[in-house]
Amino acid sequence: MKIAIASDHAALEMKSDLVEWLIEAGHEVADLGPDSSDSVDYPDYGYKLADVIAEGTAERGIALCGSGIGISMSVNRNPAVRCALVSEPFSASLAREHNDANCLALGARLTGSDLAKACVSAFLETEFAGGRHQRRVDKLTTPPR
């Protein structure tokens, strides 16, 4: 699977760990930055990740910042992206199964490496259920007026 990943400076270490782990698992990973621990603005990286997902360059995205909150907000500004902020694997699985989430957000200051990997695994391994959920997902992209 082609996976894009982006973070801010607070999640640089978690991003590096996840990139290495995902590559070892056989995934193609696009690391969208940053490349150093210098302070950066999470919206810049969130927008970059959202563009890659919306263009279809990557099948799934992983967004990381200190809490996961700010970067998930910036990623979700793009109507083609459904980014779920999670803190445990069951929510990551439900985000895929019920909401067809194409991006996962995690907080590096709140989630340890093992738990982050468990969340990412659940996210990548779960298929969208479709059916009654499809109607709801469609409304996320084109809200009824």
Image (cartoon, rainbow, N blue to C red):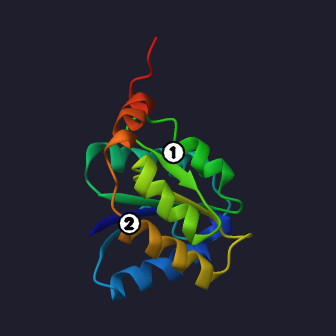
* Amino acid type, label 1: Val
What residue sits 34% from the left and 39% below the top? 134
Question: Cβ–Cβ below 8 Å for labels 1 and 2?
Answer: no
Crowd around label 1: few <14 · some 14–19 · many ≥20 (10 Å): many
What SS does tag 1 mark? helix
Say whether residue 76 is left or right of residue 10.
left
* Amino acid type, label 2: Thr
- What percent of the width, then of the height, locates residue 36? 57, 71
Say whether residue 138 is left or right of residue 122.
left
Crowd around label 2: few <14 · some 14–19 · many ≥20 (10 Å): some
- What percent of the width, then of the height, locates residue 48? 44, 48
Q: Residue furthest front?
A: 132
Q: Nearer the viewer, residue 112 or 16?
A: 112
Q: Nearer the viewer, residue 112 or 49?
A: 112
What residue sits 48% from the left and 64% below the top? 93
Q: Nearer the viewer, residue 141 or 3?
A: 141
The answer, for residue 33, to whether it is visible in the render is no
What residue sits 39% from the left and 53% below the top? 102
Q: How many marks?
A: 2
Q: Which residue is mark 1?
A: 75
Query: Where is the N terminus found, in terms of image quarters?
Result: bottom left
What residue sits 58% from the left and 49% below the top? 72
